[in-house]
Each structure stands twice: as structure tokens, then as C-alpha cells.
Image (spheres, grey):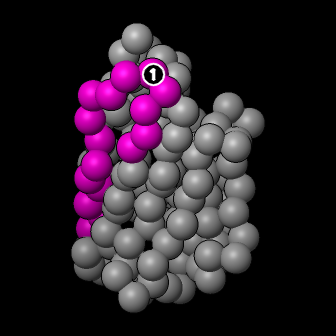
Amino acid sequence: QVQLVESGGGLVQAGDSLRLSCVLASGRTFSRHAMGWFRQAPGKEREFAAAISWTGFDTSYADSVKGRFTISRDNAKNTVYLQMNSLKLEDTAVYYCATHPSRYISTRLPEYDHWGQGTQVTVSS
């Protein structure tokens, strides 16, 4: 059973920073798979935020977060991170990490086959 556990969410003010973490606790060899971060705002569909290849060399970002968010991974710790800087009100959402069945980067939500439970990020003015 693949188990992903996110942490690091919280309530912050606009302009602040947060770092989300996601540990792949069991069920898959972390270093062999691409990883992604997605988010879902109230009343909206889940959307792509960032993705990283198995080596960490390739990354991709949604236009809405490009230049502010950074995805990274530590394969020794089975952990993927999302560093979020200059947070905006519109970044408020539940953030989910997900693991992809292949090693290569993907921005396509339906391709990800295992998901964490999500962590809430709330940005206030």
C-alpha cells in the first residue's frame, strides 16, 4: 500500500513563506518515481502546481506559481518539498502530493496514481 503523508501547511499572511513536505512512507520506491504537488481551492477543481522528475533534474510549474514556488526532493529521505514564497490570497487551498507511476515529469493530474491526504494552506491579508 502506497502511503504519502504531507505536512507543513498552516495559516500565514500574504507575502509570507511556507515549506510543505511529503514523505512516501511505504509501498513504492520513492527514488524511481516522479512526484507532483497539486492544490484545490474551495469550490474549484484540483489543479497542477509543480512536478519533479525522479532525479530532481527536471521540474515544471504552473504559471500561477512560477517564480514563487520551488519543488525539490531528497531521495535519501523519501521526501518531496514545496517551498512557497511570496504567498498570495489566491494560494489558499488544500495542497496534495502525488506519486507518478513513471520516472518522468508530468503535469497531468489523471496520470498520478497515489495521493496524500492533503494539507491546508490559508493565506490571509
Q: Amino acid at mark 1?
A: Ala
Q: Position of residue 103 (x, y in %)?
A: 62, 79
Depth check: give the residue in front, 92 or 118: 92
Res. 76 image quadrant: bottom left
Label 1: which secondary element? loop
- Residue 51 in sight in this render: yes
* Dot 1 alpha-carbon crowd within 10 angstroms: few under 14, some 14 to 19, many 20 or more: some
Image position of 119 with respect to 1: above or below? above
Q: Is residue 104 visible?
A: no
The one nearer the camera, 28 or 77, is 77
Q: Is residue 74 above or below residue 4?
A: below
Of all residues, the one furthest to the top in this rendering is: 125
Residue 68 place in picture, x, y as percent: 62, 41
User: Residue 74 at x, y = what percent?
Assistant: 45, 78
The residue wearing badge 1 is: 14
Q: From the viewer's perspective, tell me whether residue 82 is left or right of residue 105.
A: left
In the image, residue 37 lies in the stretch drawn in magenta: no
Residue 13 lies in the magenta-colored region: yes
Locate residue 5, reporting x and y percent. 26, 60
Quarter of the image that includes the C terminus: top left
Residue at figure coordinates x 52%, y 40% from the top left: 85
Q: Main secondary structure of the magenta part?
A: strand
- Badge count: 1
What range of the chain is rendered magenta? Answer: 3-18
Give the residue at x 70% y 42%. 66
Q: Is residue 48 left or right of residue 79?
A: right
Quadrant location of the N terminus? Answer: bottom left
Identity of the residue drawn at 35% across and 59% down: 21
Q: Which residue is depicted at the point 54% across and 66% down?
A: 72
Quadrant housing residue 60 = bottom right
